[in-house]
Amino acid sequence: MPPDAALPRTLLSWMVRGEWRAHPVRTFVAVLAIAVGVALGFAVHLVNRSALAEFDTAVRSVTGAADLRVEAVSVSGFDETLYPRLARLPALSAVSPVVEVTAQTRDGRSLTVLGLDPLRAARVTPALAVGAGSGFGAGRETGREDAVWLSPAVMGGAGEVLEVREGGRRVDLPVAGGLPSVEAGQRLAVGDIAAVQQAFGRIGRLNRLDLLVAAGVSRSEAERAIAAILPADARLSTPEAESRRGGDLSRAYRVNLGMLAMVALLTGGFLVFSAQSLSIARRRPAFALLQVLGLPRRGLFLQVLAEGAVLGVIGAVLGLAGGAALAGAVLSLLGGDLGGGFFSGSRPALDISPGWTLIHGTLGLAVALAGSLLPALDAARTPPAQALKSAGESGDPGRRPPLAPALGLGAAGLAAAFAPPIAGLPLMGYASIALILAAGVAAMPWLARRMISPLTRIAAPVPVRLAAARLAGAPDQAAVALCGLVASASLMAAMGLMVASFRGSVDDWLGAILPADVYMRVANAEMAGLDPTLQAALAAVPRVDGIESRRTLTLSLSAERPPVALLAISPAAGGAPDLPWRAPPRAVDEGEVPAWISEPLSRLYRLSPGDTLDLPLAGRTVKVRVAGVWRDYGRQFGAVALRRSDYLRITGDAGANEAGFTLAAGADPTDVLQRIRQALPPDLAAQTEVAPSAEIRRVALRIFDRSFAVTYALEAVAILVGVAGVAATVSAQTLARRREFGMLRHVGAGRGQILAMLALEGALLGAVGAVAGLALGAAMGQVLIQVVNPQSFNWTMDTRWPLGLLGGLALALTLASSLTALLAGRSALSADAVRAVREDW
Amino acid sequence: MDRLTRRSLLAGGAAAALPPAQAIAAPDFAQVIPGRRLVFPRDHGAHPDFRTEWWYVTGWLDGPTGPLGFQVTFFRTRTGLGEGNPSRFAPRQVLFAHAALSDPRVGRLLHGQRIARQGFGLAEASERDMDIVLDDWRLVRERSGAMRALAGGEGFQLDLVLTPTQPILLQGEGGFSRKGPRPEQSSWYYTLPHLQVSGRLEREGRWRPVRGQAWLDREWSSTLLDPVAVGWDWTGINLDDGGALTAFRVRDARGRAVWTGGSLRSADGRLWTAPNGAVAFEGGRTWRSPRTGAVYPVAPTVRLRTPAGERRWALTPLFDDQELDSRPSGGPVYWEGAVRVPGGRGYLELTGYAAPLRL
């Protein structure tokens, strides 16, 4: 029987268990780090998968069996005469007309009201025609033809009356019954098309046509036939495109959270590396003994790798369980978009697939194995003779740590930062961050030596010189202790830099887009809202100096992308409006309609000043000239601003749903606010928010901070894990250095001096880690700001240096590291000096 | 004539899409009041003020493989809904239609249907002349007086031209036809018998020319049947000698006649209208539906007590299983089939045998 079979299996498992039992904290920290990484990644995946599954079902339950659909580009819909024209196309076997209204229920939540012709919907969207099918019915249950059927998510039973608001009007909808086959998360009311048209002022307009392609006709053939007669304010879409758009809504958001998980996992990998390296250093004599007894190098290598695998499996299993629990909690508390507002109102069920579970688990295992690879190679490579002599150290203090690998990694990271996005995602940006991190860690031995060597040459108290000499002489050890810390510190610094820059830019932007004193917004009023009379009445409110009313609405520019926002605004003095410009506005030729587009729109649709843009307005295509690009953090999918006078001329819509008020000097905002509210008719007031701009700004920043609080919490966890890694490492090293301490005691060093030396060592480690981490973090933060953000969200920001945060971070790391080293040293020093020296046999 | 199938399709049927009148603020339905003269072509067109109306074509085709029965029926109903709604989708009028083909070689009815609210040119019924559009189905009276019918169903399409060979037959008193003991239980009712059929029939993708003879019933009314009625028997026969026989009987739960009516017009145009009680449907062979378990008297003998003496016609179905189950679309189960008599061919309708008709 070969020696690497029977003997090692028992012996090695016994050794491993002994090691883990002796150092539970270190093992636990490594496992925990892996678990946190896996849990985060898995939770983000699960939440998003469940949300998307929900979105898909929602799309399907609303579109039913439809092969294609024609959608309005804006809320105002398209002319209903398109319906018979499409219905007569031989390429289509069924056409179901739909009026869609987004209204607000009393609790302020939004509700989609669909008006259908049940006789037409029966073939195309049977799930929605069922309720309506038992009567145009309405009448049958309620005696009222304007009754609606409600999805389970909307409270209200047959016989009750649902009060909703839209466009400044209140509509009471008698409830006829439920729509049991609509997904639980959907907030839907279905009524008769004619009644909905009448109740919501949509006479003559439709928002959607759900289509079935005739048997024997290819879909592309049908698409061509439809495209030939489609007006400018309608667009052809497929259920797949709709689904894809749903995915788009949250993609950047989810990728960024995923990246956070990835960094946590990487940190875990470094901690495994650090734990394994130390554990191997400690057990070097034991391993050497085994080698002498006949265990081949391969066996030793596999042994260390197997230990990593066990850590990885435990971490992965814990992580998967934690991730599922986290996702469940998040879904029930925040909904499918983590409170991001992309999928309104849905509370999807957890959707776990075995394949993806396996992938995430495997990822945890792979990271643990990768972290164990170098230590395993190291253990197998060390000659037994040297290992038997020295319990903890294998390095040669005179050896110069190489810098070339780090430089290579760094160069690769830099190159990756300039790569374009892949499939619309900043994948190369993430690769760049990972490479920079790897470069930083690879440079740690060199850096530690370069930073600490000068200290050995200066005249300083003994403990300082001892500490410096120790670190400078064993930079690899220092690097091992530091890599987890550097990884987490650099992540924290990078995120801190990015968030600070983002927040600063958002703050500036808020100031620029909210120049007035008080703002008013009518919810769900892309049509109707404030009519000209009402606007005049508002302008006449005492102590109001000026009013700027706007129409804002959503407009679909492409079937493949989520709709953009259209703002009809009144620039002062008829020139360019006052917006946070990215590219200074320029004049357009006489007779041209200027359009000022937001940065995301400019990037998504590849438009620059001077280009023309086709806007589907009032049933025709209006060519506008891009006259400037402005910064916008509010509308991720793009926004385009037009002069209100142009908008009025094109559409004839003189209404508004937003207004900004400039108050007379010295006016009391609360008082004016009250007057503004009183000037509104009660039904309109119920769906109108009025607030001073200062408060809007405050609320916006509060929301910003809250949404990044998750990020901060995650970073804090990473830092704690990093510091715990330092503690575990230092204590392990301290234990391994008991002979050194014994020798120092023999040559006359006091216990206090040794403790001071350890504290200093810790502080130096922490300082080196912090400096390296901050430097790396700055580089990674720039990648986040310059590459990842523009590529995922299509907006840019100005760099702000959160000096306080970074300085505090450096100080905290130094102190924490020093403190942990001290604590670890105390336990090592409790053993008596004589015995420590005697161990050196 | 106010046949229950048609009525129940309107009330309980129409894909269950129509609410009972009493659930809605009752609209002003026009009433059938005797004394008015029917005017053509105006009265070939729709009468949207009335609650229900139909254009009911039944007939025989001489196919290359033997005789076939067919029905193409268009219904209009005023729902009482959306009367005050300016929307063009307002469901004031709903049109629906059935088509069925009776082929003895198939041994059951092949059928199809259409239903839509009136509007947008997709579903329309003209008020000037017979001109009904329901998606791709059509029934239109052309300038020549001939009617064109386009309809289809499972594996068949009909494209028929129906040419009148006889003058219009006004049922009841000049078209005013009583349906029950109360005077308001009545309808406007006229018939075009002996329509000469030409055109083409598609079976399984192949079009073939066909010829035949058909019968058009036109009826409109606003009034429901008598409450005790559970079912209805009706027959319309083109007699080979050029005569036209119409007979109907409203039954109560025990199978007794609540009201009867009909007419007999000879080839020379002499018309006798049967008063209540002068028509009887008698026994004969029954057929039990394997699907619904309903037992239909598919071969009754129709007896008319005319002033010239009693006349009898023994009806024989083209084949037994001509049951139409329209329950999936919210309608009733009934038997509507091609029948022969010695010296004539026509259609027989038997309703209320599977279950009492809900109205």
Image (tube, coloured by chain):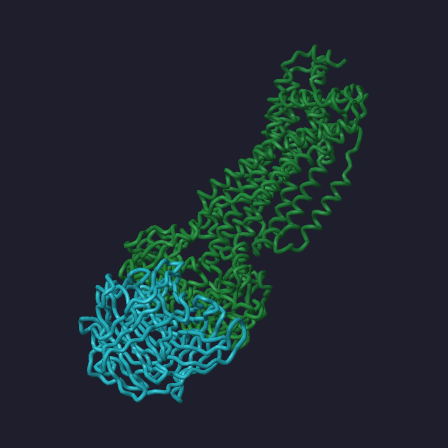
Chain colours: A green, B cyan
Q: Position of residue A686 (x, y in %)?
A: 32, 56
Look at the picture and state if B350 lies above or below A395.
Answer: below
Q: Position of residue A717 (x, y in %)?
A: 55, 35
Q: Position of residue B24 (x, y in %)?
A: 25, 65
Looking at the image, can residue B85 be seen? Answer: no
Q: To which quarter of the image does residue A762 belong? A: top right
Q: Position of residue B60 (x, y in %)?
A: 41, 77
The one nearer the camera, A432 or B68, is B68
Q: To which quarter of the image does residue A262 belong? A: top right
Position of residue A404 in the picture relative to residue A24 (left or right):
right
Position of residue A36 in the picture relative to residue A272 (left or right):
left
Q: To which quarter of the image does residue B150 belong? A: bottom left
Look at the picture and state if B341 lies above or below A219.
Answer: below
The one nearer the camera, A472 or A342, is A342
The one nearer the camera, A254 or B237, is B237
The one nearer the camera, A825 or B307, is B307
Position of residue A164 in the picture relative to residue A269 (left or right):
left
Position of residue A649 in the picture relative to residue A406 (left or right):
left
Look at the picture and state if B142 lies above or below B86.
Answer: below
- Tell me which residue sits at (37%, 82%) in the image: B240
Look at the picture and state if A504 lies above or below A216.
Answer: above
- Tell me which residue sits at (49%, 44%) in the image: A350
Looking at the image, can residue A817 be seen? Answer: yes
Please identify the quadrant where the C terminus of chain A is shown: top right
Q: How many marks?
A: 0
Please identify the quadrant where the N terminus of chain A is shown: top right
